[in-house]
Image: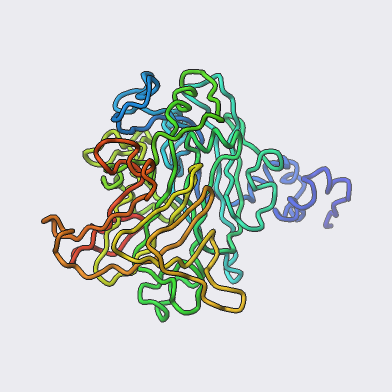
């Protein structure tokens, strides 16, 4: 005879919704008694798409010009010189490997992306966050969060703003669940002690790919920024241009157990993808293309450590290059993101860009009017993102080629102090290059891939 579950037994068992989701009500009594409520819920939770760790670490910035006694930091292990807080991608690492990443954060935080939510094939996107604590400052017991800046309709529980949602204490994990309905370019950051944690480096780029992707009838590559319906945001290559800043004194204060006065903020370095020119055109760290499905996945050694770019050991924790490579006639997407505290004026000299999106919104009015525009300068304030597309010009082999077999165009911040870092040699801050090759550039496997 079938035994029915009483209301009292039902509530004692697991708390209603979790039991229904798990189908526990149809299990025999001895199975039901073997599962604790949290075990029932955990058994039904899908694995996260990505696993992030929050911690501290060290990066390299050029020691010239000197900016004060606090830089280079005398606590820094060679070849690094600047203390940061940050995140690491620990997806797929063992527990031992994951714990080894304490005090090994990177800047900027890892780039990741998700596909737009498809009602026909519903799947939420999950990012698990663990807090490893700070190796240099064990006296600081700050929690961390992931706040997806600009993400629409996120429920407060997963928003990452600590007074209205969950923050992750040291040694604990939390999984953020997103239903990404709106394509475009975003950013994320820790929202605990947000002025300090953002400036110290707990920031990174993120974007959502549109459902229109794969439609080669609108644009041959089948790659788009938005669901434009006409191929106007189609592109062949994409490069993230993430802007941040370093006030060296504040970083020194955090490593030396001092308290920075944020009202004295003065950025000494302006960074593009975590580096300053000419390091911005140095290679990417070796990428594991097989695992770069949802994130820019840097190869790791047996201890889980990032593998440094070939010939650049000092850039081990700054793995993302800003160099832009392309062939004539290709459409190149630049995803500009500003999470510094100052406005940037990013200029592409000699090539016009069309701004097709701003703050993860297609430049199109409600009545369908095209509001995109052509410019050579993107003015991005703190917390803003822009999607810019340019068509690579014909290869000339002229004055811009420098005998290297490519034409060179500069992308740089027009604001003098942010493009030079006040060094004597010209460019030194937020600057990179566009290199147009006549041939030999393969299709991209992941964002910021040179194809070479």
The C terminus - image quarter: bottom left
Q: Which residue is rendered at x = 55% and y = 78% of the image?
A: 369
* Whole-percent x, y for residue 174 in the image: 61, 41
Judge from the rendering whether residue 334 lies leftward or rightward of residue 226; answer left or right.
left
Q: Which residue is rendered at x = 51% and y = 32% of the image?
A: 265
Residue 381 vs 445, above or below: the answer is above
The N terminus - image quarter: bottom right
Closer to the camera in the image, 294 or 341:
341
**What colouring method underlies this structural image?**
rainbow
Q: Which residue is rendered at x = 45% and y = 62% of the image?
A: 387
Residue 220 vs 251, above or below: the answer is below
* Whole-percent x, y for residue 84 in the image: 45, 31
* Whole-percent x, y for residue 420 in the image: 32, 41
Residue 48 vs 325, above or below: the answer is above
Closer to the camera in the image, 284 or 117:
284
Q: Which residue is rendered at x = 83% and y = 48% of the image?
A: 10
* Whole-percent x, y for residue 374 in the image: 41, 69
Q: Residue furthest bottom?
A: 217
Closer to the camera in the image, 99 or 140:
140
């Amino acid at each position: 005879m079938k035994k029915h579950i009483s209301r009292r037994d039902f509530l004692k068992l697991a708390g209603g919704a979790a039991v229904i989701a798990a189908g526990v009500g149809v299990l025999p009594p001895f199975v039901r008694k073997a599962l604790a409520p949290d075990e029932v819920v955990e058994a039904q939770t899908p694995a996260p798409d990505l696993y992030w760790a929050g911690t501290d670490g060290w990066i390299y910035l050029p020691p010239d010009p000197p900016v004060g006694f606090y830089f280079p930091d005398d606590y820094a292990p060679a070849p690094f010189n600047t203390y940061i807080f940050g995140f690491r991608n620990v997806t797929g690492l063992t527990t031992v490997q994951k714990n080894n990443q304490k005090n090994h954060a990177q800047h900027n935080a890892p780039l990741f992306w998700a596909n737009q939510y498809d009602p026909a094939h519903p799947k939420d996107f999950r990012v698990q966050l663990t807090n490893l604590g700070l190796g240099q400052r064990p006296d600081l017991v700050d929690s961390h969060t992931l706040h997806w800046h600009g993400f629409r309709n996120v429920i407060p529980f997963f928003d990452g703003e600590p007074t209205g949602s969950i923050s992750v204490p040291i040694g604990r994990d939390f999984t953020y669940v997103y239903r990404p309905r709106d394509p475009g370019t975003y950013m994320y950051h820790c929202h605990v002690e947000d002025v300090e944690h953002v400036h110290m480096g707990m920031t990174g780029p993120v974007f959502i790919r549109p459902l229109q992707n794969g439609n080669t009838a609108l644009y041959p590559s089948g790659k788009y920024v938005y669901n434009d319906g006409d191929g106007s945001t189609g592109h062949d290559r994409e490069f993230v241009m993430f802007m941040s800043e370093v006030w060296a004194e504040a970083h020194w204060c955090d490593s030396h157990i001092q308290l920075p006065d944020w009202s004295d903020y003065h950025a000494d370095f302006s960074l593009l993808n975590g580096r300053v020119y000419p390091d911005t055109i140095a290679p990417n760290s070796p990428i594991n293309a097989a695992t770069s499905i949802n994130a820019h996945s840097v190869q790791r050694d047996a201890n889980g450590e990032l593998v440094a770019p070939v010939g650049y050991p000092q850039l081990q924790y700054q793995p993302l290059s800003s160099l832009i490579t392309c062939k004539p006639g290709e459409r190149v997407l630049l995803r500009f993101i500003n999470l510094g505290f100052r406005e940037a004026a990013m200029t592409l000299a000699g090539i016009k860009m069309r701004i097709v999106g701003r703050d993860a919104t297609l430049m199109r009015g409600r009545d369908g009017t095209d509001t995109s525009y052509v410019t050579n300068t993107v003015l991005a304030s703190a917390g803003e993102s822009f999607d810019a597309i340019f068509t690579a010009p014909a290869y000339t082999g002229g004055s811009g080629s420098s005998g290297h077999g490519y034409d060179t165009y500069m992308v740089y911040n027009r604001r003098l102090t942010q493009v030079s870092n006040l060094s004597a040699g010209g460019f030194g801050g937020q600057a990179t290059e566009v290199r147009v090759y006549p041939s030999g550039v393969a299709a991209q496997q992941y964002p910021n891939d040179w194809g070479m």
